[in-house]
């Protein structure tokens, strides 16, 4: 095994840290998105509208998650990131367990607020750590492997959550989702160490972390970042809306049970999505060897390939065609994450990296997670009088527009990305 040293760590050790932070993201996404497979059961018990479901799946989590991510990232640029990740993991796992005890919609809403509080501390710190473990020309691969944890989390959430919910009820599914994170906290604290900042880039960590306003101004002055932030927001708008409402769509329009839906989405979103998300970083690193701006071509091409399958998936009355059409969007849907995260880490100096990731996640989640499920839920209710059960089909199909808008933004970002990264070296 290759034991060469990068950033003070052997390859074996830095790959282990990548594996562990990816596990944290798996649990993060499991706890965040198990709600999606449970929404039909929650809707029936509490007699909720699609608008209320959109609120529960979107803003209830997104506003807290996105807003608190910035101050926690501000601390991560100054403190031990490993400890921040572990503390956040403990909080969001505990809050997911508390969802098991919710006896009303309000109590469940408050528990989801708590989940958002905990999960806010993981993403920015993990992005910063990975940037210290892997140099720029390997970074998109590493961040895509980490990002593929969301697909594993979805696989477990959809398959395991659907199975548990059908047999033991939706509350038991929350309990089963929250407990693994509490165990992972102990292993994470015992086996993961804080890497030294800047060594993967050959940079010395000699400057103090700047203020939040300074970081925000510098980041926003980078033209490529502005387009990356908007592009990821547009992609996430449809992605989060789909995660929230596709299980309900399959139940209403095709009569599938929670266990059947869970199995289908576990295979497509989980397995296919994992391969696509992880490989997108490998492809991005290869085509970006001479010009890092080319990495943005990956989400552009992926979006254009997946887009024609959306109308077939949402509008077909044949379950066979629906399943077939789901494969390509599942494979390519999260291919923007690794290239976008990697580019953002390269667009700022060392002590801005966690905060830069938090700013990206703030914009992405406020627009994508905060508005995506909520907008689709409202649109579905507005269309219900004229379309009946098919209202959700058309509400979900509308997100194709934001997906294509995202592809345009990535193309624009790639035009100046290399130049903007070189500018960082002069700061």
Image (spheres, rainbow, N blue to C red):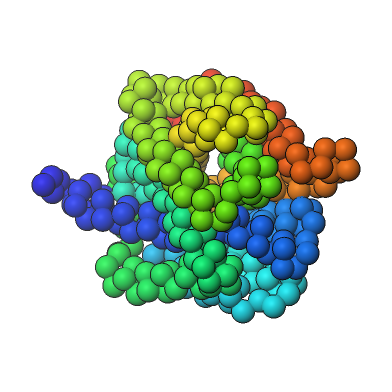
Res 218 quadrant in image: top right
Residue 365 percent coordinates (x, y): 63, 49
Instruction: Identify the residue shown where x is 65% and y is 32%.
Output: 317
- Decide which of 387, 54 is in the foreground and name it: 387
Quick check: 8 left or right of 228? left
Instruction: Identify the residue shown where x is 46% and y is 26%.
Output: 298
Q: How many marks?
A: 0
Q: Is residue 135 visible?
A: yes
Instruction: Identify the residue shown where x is 40% and y is 43%.
Output: 271
- Decide which of 188, 335 is in the foreground and name it: 335
Residue 124 percent coordinates (x, y): 50, 54
Quick check: 259 left or right of 230? left
- Decide which of 7, 38 is in the foreground and name it: 38
Residue 64 percent coordinates (x, y): 66, 62
Give above or below for 48 relative to 255: below
Res 398 quadrant in image: top right
């Amino acid at each position: 095994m290759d034991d060469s040293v990068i950033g003070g760590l052997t390859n074996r050790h830095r790959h282990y840290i990548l594996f562990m932070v990816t596990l944290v993201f798996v649990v993060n996404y499991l706890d965040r998105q198990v709600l999606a497979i449970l929404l039909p059961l929650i809707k029936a018990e509490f007699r909720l509208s699609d608008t209320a479901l959109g609120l529960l799946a979107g803003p209830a989590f997104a506003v807290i998650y996105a807003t608190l991510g910035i101050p926690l990232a501000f601390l991560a640029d100054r403190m031990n990131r490993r400890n921040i990740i572990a503390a956040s993991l403990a909080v969001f796992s505990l809050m997911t367990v508390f969802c098991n005890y919710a006896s009303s919609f309000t109590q469940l809403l408050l528990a989801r607020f708590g989940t958002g509080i905990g999960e806010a501390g993981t993403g920015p710190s993990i992005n910063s750590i990975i940037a210290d473990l892997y140099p720029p020309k390997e970074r998109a691969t590493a961040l895509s492997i980490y990002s593929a944890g969301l697909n594993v989390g979805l696989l477990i959430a959809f398959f395991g959550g659907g199975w548990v919910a059908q047999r033991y009820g939706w509350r038991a599914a929350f309990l089963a989702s929250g407990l693994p994170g509490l165990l992972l906290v102990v292993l994470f604290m015992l086996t993961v160490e804080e890497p030294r900042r800047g060594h993967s880039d050959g940079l010395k960590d000699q400057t103090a972390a700047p203020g939040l306003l300074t970081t925000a101004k510098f980041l926003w002055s980078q033209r490529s970042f502005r387009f990356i932030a908007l592009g990821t927001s547009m992609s996430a708008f449809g992605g989060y809306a789909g995660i929230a409402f596709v299980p309900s769509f399959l139940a209403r329009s095709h009569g599938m049970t929670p266990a059947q839906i869970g199995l289908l989405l576990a295979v497509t979103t989980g397995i296919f999505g994992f391969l696509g998300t992880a490989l997108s970083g490998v492809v991005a690193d290869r085509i970006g060897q001479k010009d890092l701006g080319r990495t943005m071509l990956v989400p552009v091409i992926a979006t254009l390939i997946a887009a024609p399958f959306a109308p077939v998936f949402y509008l077909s009355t044949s379950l066979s065609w629906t399943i077939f059409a789901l494969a390509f969007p599942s494979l390519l849907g999260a291919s923007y994450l690794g290239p976008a995260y990697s580019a953002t880490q390269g667009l700022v100096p060392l002590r801005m990296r966690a905060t830069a990731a938090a700013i990206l996640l703030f914009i992405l989640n406020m627009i994508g997670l905060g508005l995506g499920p909520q907008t689709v839920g409202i649109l579905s209710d507005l269309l219900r009088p004229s379309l009946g059960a098919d209202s959700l089909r058309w509400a979900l199909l509308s997100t194709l527009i934001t997906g294509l808008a995202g592809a345009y933004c990535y193309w624009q970002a790639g035009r100046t990305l290399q130049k903007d990264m070189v500018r960082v070296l002069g700061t």
